[in-house]
Amino acid sequence: MLVAFWALAAVALVLALLQLGVALRLGSRLEPLGAGHPGEGAVSPPEGGGDAAVHADRPRISALVPLRGAPAGLEDRLRRLLSALGRDDQLVLATETEDDPAYAVATAVEAAHPDRDVEVVLSGPAGVRMGKQHNLSAALNRARHDLLAFMDDDVLIERANLEDGVAALTRVGEPTPDGTSAPAVGAAFALPFYGADAGSGRSLGGDVVAAYTNHGFAPNMASIALQGPPRFIIGGYWMTTREALGAIGGLEPFTATVSDDAAIGRAFAETGRSNVMLGRPVRLEPERLDLRGGVRHVLKWLTLLRAEGLGVLILCYLTWHPLATALLAALLSWLAQGVSGRAGLSVLAAVLALRALAVLVLDTRVYGLRPPGRYLPAQLFYEALLAPWLFLVAAFRREVVWRGRRYRLAAGGRLEAAQGDRGYV
C-alpha cells in the first residue's frame, strides 16, 4: 500500500506537470483571435457579406454546413457565417427532409439574402449512414468552388478563421524557413473551444462539456498535431481542396464510420498529403444542458475515442486526468501504514494548483477567454469525480447517440445499424 501511494503520487505530479507543459507549449505556438473575438466584446462582421477588398485576392470558397434539428441560435450563427464569407463565396446548407426543423431555418436564411449564393440541399433519409457525412456528401455535389470549408452548425466562424484556412491551402510549394517547399495539404483544421458570450447564462452540463473539450481533448490533440503532420483532423471546422478530397474518394466512403474525422485524416495522410492545424482556434457555441445532458454529451465523445481502440481510450484517461490519480493517492494515504494523511493532501493540493495554472494558461494564451478560469470549477469536478466513471462506461459502450439518432458500432468504429423514429435499419 505504501509503494502504491508513492507511485500514484509521483505519477499524478508528473502528469500534472506534463499538462502544464502542454498548455505552455500551445501558448507559445497558437494565438487567440484577439481581444476582439466574439464573446469578448467583438464586433460581428457587417450583415450582408464581407468587404470585397478583404476577399479580393483570395480564391472563392464553398462553405458546407450539415444540419439536423434547430438548436437555439442556429439562424444567428448561419447569418454570422454568411457575413464572414465573401460576397462571391457560396454557402450550402444540407438537411435530410423538409420535416426537419433545420429546413425552415435554412430556407429563411436563403430567402433573407437573395443577393448571396446560398443553397439549401435535401439529402434524403440517412438510413444506416452517419447523418453528418451523409448531409455533407449531398452538399458537396452542389459545391461550385475548388476551396471547400466544412463546419458544424454550432461553430462561430470568424473571417480570420477562413483566411487562415485559405492561406494554409494555397501556400503549397512556397519555400519554408528550413529551405524546403511547403507540402501538399490534405486538410487544414482549427482547434475547437467553448467560449460563452459576456453575460450569457450558465448551465452545469454545458460547463462540464466545455471543461472536457477546452482542457482535456483540445489541448492534448493539439499537442499531438504540433509533433508533426497529424493523421487525424478535428471536424468542427476544416478546409480542403476539391483535388485533395477527390484523391480520397470524396466524402462517400466516410458515411459508414462513426469516427469520420479520424478516418478522413488518415485517408489524406495515406495519399501523401499533410494535415495541418491552423494557428488560431475556432469558438463553439456553449451547450445549454443540465448535468445529465452534459454527462451524456461527454460520454458520446468518449465512445468515439473508444471506437479508435481500447488502448487509445486508456491512454487518454491516464494522461488527461492527473487530478483523478492524485485523488486516488490521497485516499490511499489514509489507508497506507507509514504515510500520514497530510502527505496525501499535500500531493492533492500540488496537483490542484498545477491543473488550475494549466487551465489559466490555456484560457489566456490560447483561447483568449475573459474572465479566465470560467470553466475551472467544472474542470476540477469533471476530472476528479466524473472522468473515472465515464471512461469506464465508454470502454464497454457500443452505441452512440447523435442528434436524436442512435448508432450501433461494429469493429473499427464502423456503423452496424442506426435507430431513428422507425427502429434500427
Image (tube, rainbow, N blue to C red):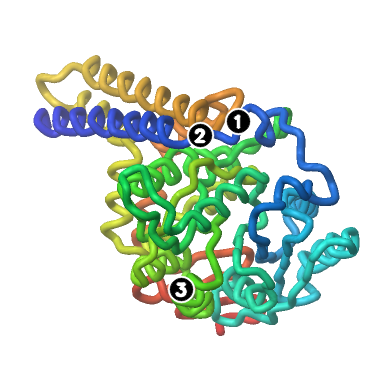
Q: Residue at x 40, y 45 (%)?
A: 222
Mark 3 or 1, nearer chain start = 1
Q: Which residue is drawn at 44% across and 76% down?
A: 248
Question: In the current view of this chain or complex, which residue is farthest to the bottom?
Answer: 425
Query: Which element is circle 3 on?
Result: loop
Report the residue marked by disc 2. 31
Near-viewer residue (347 or 116): 116
Is residue 72 among the parts visible in the rendering? no
Which percent across, then down, holds residue 261?
47, 63
Report the residue marked by disc 1. 34
User: Amino acid type of disc 2?
Assistant: Glu
Which percent across, then down, holds residue 383?
40, 37
Query: Which element is circle 1 on?
Result: loop
Label 2 CA crowd tier, 10 Å (few <14, some 14–19, many 20+): some
Near-viewer residue (126 or 243): 243
Residue 321 lies in quadrant = top left
User: Amino acid type of disc 3?
Assistant: Thr
Q: In this view, does 188 lie above or below 23?
A: below
Residue 201 tag number:
none
Report the residue marked by disc 3. 257
Report if the CB atoms under discs 3 and 2 are less than 8 Å apart: no
User: Amino acid type of disc 1?
Assistant: Gly
The CA span between labels 1 and 2 is 8 Å
Report if the CB atoms under discs 1 and 2 are less than 8 Å apart: yes
Instruction: Locate the N terminus by quadrant.
Output: top left
Residue 124 lies in quadrant = bottom right
Near-viewer residue (212 or 425): 212
The residue mark sitting in front, 3 or 1, is 1
Is residue 51 among the parts visible in the rendering? yes
The CA span between labels 3 and 1 is 36 Å
